[in-house]
Structure formats: structure tokens, C-alpha cells
Image: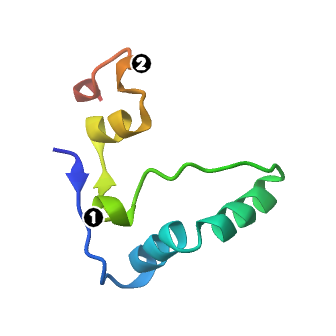
């Protein structure tokens, strides 16, 4: 399984990322747009509070992005 729930009382960069994506996502999106020089809306998939701050890996990650069915080769080949 490639879904890994995280604690909400984490520390350091994990806590900062959880806070930024769930509480300050508009600000974070604005800052990212400034860096890349293009206005864009980001649809955050993880780590969302409503999903236990889960992080995704492997096929679950690709499924979350909606691209698993576009893979030409199975991940097990890598």
C-alpha cells in the first residue's frame, strides 16, 4: 500500500507543509506563481487534513494524480 497517514502534531518541515497546504494554500499558490513567473491555480492532492495528512507513494501516488492508467510500464520494472 502506498498511502501513509501522518500525524497532525508533527514537527519541522512536515508540520510546515501541512500548515501551508491546508491553512495558507492561497498564499502558498501566490508565492509559487511568483517564483515560476506565471499565475496558476494549484489543486493540492496531499497532505490534506481531510485525508489524515496522508502521503502517497508508488501506484497510489499515480492513482491520486489520475495518471495510473497512462503508465506504459509497471512501476515494478523500475
Q: Residue at x 67, y 61 (%)?
A: 29
Quadrant containing the N terminus in the rendered view: top left
Q: Residue at x 39, y 61 (%)?
A: 47
Crowd tier of the residue under label 2, counting other residues whose Cα lies within 10 Å: few below 14, some 14–19, many 20 or above:
few
Q: Which residue is mark 1?
A: 52
Counting from the top left corner in percent of width and height, residue 7 is at 25, 75
Give the farthest residue toward the front. Answer: 50
Counting from the top left corner in percent of width and height, residue 73 is at 33, 17
61 is higher (above) or lower (below) than 70 = below
35 is higher (above) or lower (below) than 58 = below
Residue 32: mark in rendering: none
Residue 46 sits in which quadrant?
Answer: bottom left
Give SS at disc 1: loop
Crowd tier of the residue under label 1, counting other residues whose Cα lies within 10 Å: few below 14, some 14–19, many 20 or above:
some
Quadrant containing the C terminus in the rendered view: top left
Left or right: where does residue 71 sit relative to residue 2? Answer: right
Counting from the top left corner in percent of width and height, residue 61 is at 34, 41
Closer to the N terminus: mark 2 or mark 1? 1
Q: CA distance from mark 2 to mark 1?
A: 27 Å
Left or right: where does residue 17 sit relative to residue 72? Answer: right
Give SS at disc 2: helix
Residue 68 sits in which quadrant?
Answer: top left
Give the farthest residue toward the left. Answer: 1
Question: Which label sits in the foreground, 2 or 1?
Answer: 1
Q: Residue at x 84, y 53 (%)?
A: 37
Q: Which residue is mark 2?
A: 70
Left or right: where does residue 67 sit relative to residue 50? Answer: right
Amino acid at each position: 500500500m502506498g498511502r501513509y497517514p501522518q500525524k497532525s502534531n508533527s514537527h519541522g518541515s512536515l508540520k510546515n507543509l501541512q500548515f501551508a497546504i491546508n491553512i495558507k494554500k492561497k498564499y502558498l499558490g501566490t508565492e509559487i506563481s511568483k517564483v515560476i513567473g506565471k499565475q496558476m491555480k494549484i489543486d493540492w492532492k496531499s497532505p490534506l487534513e481531510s485525508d489524515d495528512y496522508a502521503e502517497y507513494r508508488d501506484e497510489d501516488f499515480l492513482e491520486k494524480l489520475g495518471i495510473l492508467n497512462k503508465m506504459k510500464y509497471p512501476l515494478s520494472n523500475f
